[in-house]
């Protein structure tokens, strides 16, 4: 395979789902890509799905009920196969049709929504899997190109004012409200876009993790265009 992801030490590239599942993270490598050039018409699927809210989970029975062309059916079979592969591995995948995520506008000095660079955390050993079939696609950043927001002096001072508690409980406060999961890109940061159709495994912050968690963000959606995203 000859593609852009091979040039980045942060990213491992595999050719099968089994390798994606079984390849461990190590060193600075905290993102794995099952690199695929998918056939099929995913836009046809999106065009037939109704979305009244900003986000809706799309279930297999909904996909199966769609009247699709041959290319649309190819896309549907790929999605159903991906969902089944993840379920069989013990994961709980969700296929989401997205207009937009909820924005965090409560505080003007720090954002903690999914459009902010962040890491995922879990009390148990797990990974984040995602694949964008249609629409705008997520970005990741190398860990040495970001700074934890809670360590930026002016943000930290404002968080201390918000906390209004003792120094002893401040770190717990940062964790309880997920402030510590969010990161600010450094001025020379170079985001890596995950692209459409590839199935990704991203490192999560958990007690047994041997690599740094992967810093990622949801993209700003394209005007008038939904996203079709598998995630778990």
Image (spheres, helix red, strand yellow):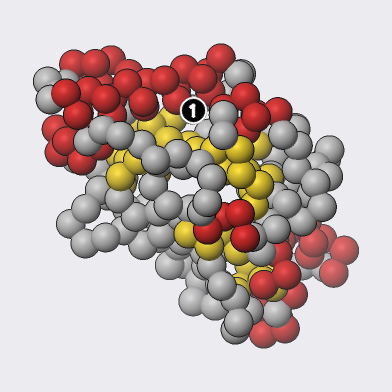
Is residue 124 positioned above or below 164 on the image? above
Q: Give the SS element for disc 1.
A: loop
Residue 55 appears in which quarter of the rendering?
top left
Q: Is 168 situated left or right of 89 in this image?
A: right
Residue 160 appears in which quarter of the rendering?
bottom right
Q: Is 219 situated left or right of 143 in this image?
A: left
Give the percent coordinates (x, y) of residue 10.
68, 56
Q: Which residue is mark 1?
A: 93
Q: Residue at x 85, y 69 (%)?
A: 167
Q: Is 87 situated left or right of 132 in this image?
A: right
Q: Nearer the viewer, residue 53 or 227?
A: 227
Q: Is residue 51 visible?
A: no
Give the percent coordinates (x, y) of residue 67.
12, 20
Q: Is residue 11 visible?
A: yes
Q: Is 161 situated left or right of 191 in this image?
A: right
Q: Residue at x 59, y 76 (%)?
A: 189
Q: Residue at x 22, y 36 (%)?
A: 41
Number of numbered tags placed on the structure image: 1
Q: Residue at x 64, y 52 (%)?
A: 11
Is residue 178 positioned above or below 65 on the image? below
Q: Nearer the viewer, residue 62 or 196?
A: 196
Which quadrant does the N terminus fall into?
top right
Give the percent coordinates (x, y) of residue 153.
72, 83
Residue placed furthest toward the right: 168
Give the percent coordinates (x, y) of residue 224.
18, 57
Residue 21 appears in which quarter of the rendering?
top right
Near mark 1 (Cα within 10 A), the count class, few <14, some 14-19 or many ≥20, is some
């Amino acid at each position: 395979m000859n593609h852009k992801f091979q040039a980045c030490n942060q990213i491992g590239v595999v050719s099968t789902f089994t390798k994606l599942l079984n390849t461990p993270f190590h060193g600075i490598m905290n993102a794995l890509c099952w690199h695929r050039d998918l056939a099929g018409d995913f836009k046809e699927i999106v065009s037939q799905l109704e979305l009244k809210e900003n986000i809706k989970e799309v279930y297999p029975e909904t996909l199966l009920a769609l009247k699709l062309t041959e290319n649309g059916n190819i896309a549907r079979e790929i999605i159903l196969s991906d969902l089944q592969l993840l379920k069989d591995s013990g994961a709980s995948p969700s296929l989401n049709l997205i207009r937009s995520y909820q924005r965090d506008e409560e505080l003007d000095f720090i954002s903690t929504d999914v459009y902010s660079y962040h890491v995922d955390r879990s009390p148990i050993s797990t990974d984040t899997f995602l694949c964008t079939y249609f629409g705008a696609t997520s970005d990741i950043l190398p860990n040495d190109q970001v700074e934890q927001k809670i360590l930026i002096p002016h943000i930290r001072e404002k968080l201390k004012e918000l906390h209004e508690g003792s120094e002893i409980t401040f770190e717990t406060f940062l964790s309880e409200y997920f402030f510590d999961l969010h990161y600010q890109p450094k001025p020379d940061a170079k985001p890596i876009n995950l692209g459409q159709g590839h199935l990704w495994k991203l490192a999560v912050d958990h007690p047994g993790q041997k690599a740094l968690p992967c810093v990622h963000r949801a993209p700003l959606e394209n005007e008038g265009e939904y996203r079709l995203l598998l995630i778990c």
